[in-house]
Amino acid sequence: MIYYRKELFMQIYLSLMSQKNPSSYDLSSPQGRMLYVRETTNAAFSSWTSPLQRQDPDTQEEKKQEMLSRIIGKLKSGKKLSAKELDFLRRTDPILYAHALRVQRMAEALKQQLSHAKSKQEANDMITSAIAGVSDKDLDKEYLLAAYNEVSKNFHKSPAYQRLPNTPEDAKKRKTNNPNAHFTDDEDTNDDTDDLLSWTPLQEIIDAAPTLECQG
């Protein structure tokens, strides 16, 4: 930015110095000098543009489409969109932005559920229920299923899942044998799922959302 300002000021200076007919202005009066400087400066502005402005519109559109294609690819694979990518969608494609925001919030809701599962069976039932709950008519079906599958994959790899008892009955037996075990389990589960829950941090989504998202 500083470089471009220097470039502009140099262009203005050169325009002033190369003015061939300053005698056409009344430089003896403040008004004449002001008019001379203003018109010369305007000429300099007209001959100078930033690199972005000089860029071919087709090139700008091509870069926009490349970014959009990359984002759609991430949505199709269930991957997290960064705050920068969400902001790009908010500015360039509000409709897709709304869909992406919904998908990530629903994925976040599933992960929150999984963090409270008391057994592997219960966790798997939560995942199955979430996937089965996606209607064929849902416009976000492809993105939602991909996001749920990504959540499932990450959760099954986590130490928290590996530590869970297999069934609710096993969980009850563990609790009976050690009445205080569930306090430790809950605390450890929260610690071990920190990385999982950071996949789409709710605060990041809120920060990237437009103001209207906060309205009731």
Image (cartoon, helix red, strand yellow):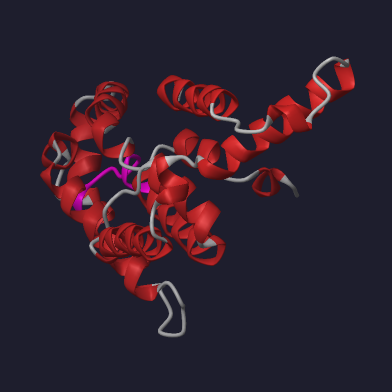
Image position, residue 11 (x, y; %)? 50, 29
Instruction: Left or right? Give the position of 137 relative to 130.
Output: right
Q: How many labels were placed on the picture? A: 0
140 in magenta: no
Residues 183 and 128: in front is 128
> Can the viewer see residue 125 in this picture?
no
**Which range is magenta?**
113-121
Residues 214 and 37: in front is 37
Q: Residue at 48% x, 42% y: name it.
A: 205
Residues 109 and 44: in front is 44
Image position, residue 86 (x, y; %)? 44, 49
Instruction: Left or right? Give the position of 207 relative to 182.
Output: right
Q: Quadrant of the N terminus?
A: top left
Residues 28 and 185: in front is 28
Q: Which residue ends up furthest to the bottom in the rendered image?
A: 137
Image position, residue 181 (x, y; %)? 24, 24
User: Is residue 69 depicted above or below 197 in this figure?
Assistant: below
Q: Residue at 40% x, 63% y: name it.
A: 61
Instruction: Left or right? Give the position of 2 relative to 24.
Output: left
> Can the viewer see residue 10 in this picture?
yes
Q: Residue at 55% x, 23% y: name it.
A: 17
Image position, residue 95 (x, y; %)? 54, 66
